[in-house]
Amino acid sequence: MANIGLVSVTNNQVILRDYVSGFPKESDLYIAPTTVDLRVPPGSMAVLVKNLYLSCDPFSRIRMEKPDPSSPASVARAYSIGKPISGYGVAKAIDSDHPNYKNGDLLWGRVGWEEYSVITPTPSSHFKIHHTDVPLSFYTGLLGIPGLTAYVGFYEICSPKKGETVFVSAASGAVGQLVGQFAKLAGCYVVGCASSKEKVDLLKTKFGYDDAFNYKEERDLSAALKRCFPEGIDIYFENVGGKMLDAVLENMRTHGRIAACGMISQYNLKEPEGVHNLATIVYKRIRIQGFAAVEFFDKYSKFLDFVLPYVREGKITYVEDIAQGLQNGPSALIGLFHGKNVGKQLVEVARE
């Protein structure tokens, strides 16, 4: 039940200054204080939560665009100018009027980029955290949307078979680092690409990739893929788009599968790049499927049952890049689009 005393506290928020065109800048976001009551109204079904971790996700860039109902990207509802941005985070219930949540419960789901959020939990937007023997921050990544994305894209959409060849772009990121490990568990040969020597080394030494390359050092992406996959690629986990997708299509095997969960190379372009090798889809009967993890929440329990034993046994590892404090949230989020993060980027707002 809601607390009896009415107390207000300062609530710092990350605000969108104006709609963004091209690459976002830190100055597109600013931090402003407001206040929040530490009590939710009786009968509201609301929960006041204290945010502990916030997830930095590439799709936030799409939501910084000026709303355009004619754009396919309009499915990602745009942020409002002068209002706090939002995303996924890990939080603790401070005051609850919701029957499924009590004070002190831990949860992950949609919250504002702020110290405290008032939410109305639904089964498709918020999930109570029952497993606390793993780091809570994992629920922004490994055990949250990125983890479910990797699981659904690889197992449900690509249906891997032992011995198949797998290529992962943006392989050291929140999703890619897991896809590579899932591929090895499935008995596949897996290669990834990343944007620095440090990240390439991480792929091979930490995540078990059979091979990896720095795409910035390759003059010819198609030749690089041919070097790594002389017999072609069975499965491509698509995070990048553009020239990389074009090169992959040239190197796919017959009946190959492509799971597309993101195309970060396109998000900051005023005019999207075209893809020139689409005829390969017909010649080689390739299946490309775009997907969003939010449409697969019915698989979340199955995913946890699959991944948690591997995590506890140390057979799956996860690298995080944690920015300390909400004040460093804007730089952490913008850094995603310049490849500054190593592993899953998140912001620690407060300790439990």
Image (tube, grey):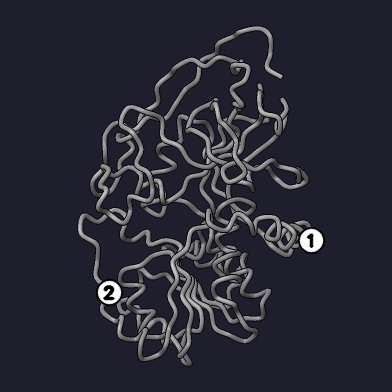
* Vertical order, 186 against 132 (above or below): below
Q: Residue drawn 47% across and 75% down?
A: 236
Residue 311 located left or right of residue 25:
right
The quarter in which the N terminus is drawn is: top right
Q: Residue drawn 63% across and 68% down?
A: 181
What is the secondary structure assignment of the residue under circle 1? loop
What is the secondary structure assignment of the residue under circle 2? loop
Front one among 223 and 116: 116
Residue at label 1? 313
The image's mark for residue 94 is none
In percent of width and height, residue 56 lies at 48, 45
In percent of width and height, residue 77 lies at 37, 44
Q: Do callouts 2 and 1 mark residues in contact (Cβ within 8 Å)?
A: no
The image's mark for residue 275 is 2
Q: Residues within 10 Å of mark 2 (few under 14, many from 20)?
A: some
Camera-near label (2 vs 1) is: 2
In percent of width and height, residue 132 lies at 75, 43
Q: Amino acid at mark 2?
A: Val
The answer to whether residue 332 is visible is yes
Mark 2 or 1, nearer chain start = 2
Q: Residues within 10 Å of mark 1 (few under 14, many from 20)?
A: few
Q: Residue furthest left?
A: 271
In percent of width and height, residue 121 lies at 60, 35
Front one among 106 and 338: 106
Q: Residue drawn 55% across and 13% down?
A: 9
The answer to whether residue 229 is visible is no
Front one among 54 and 161: 161
Q: Amino acid at mark 1?
A: Glu
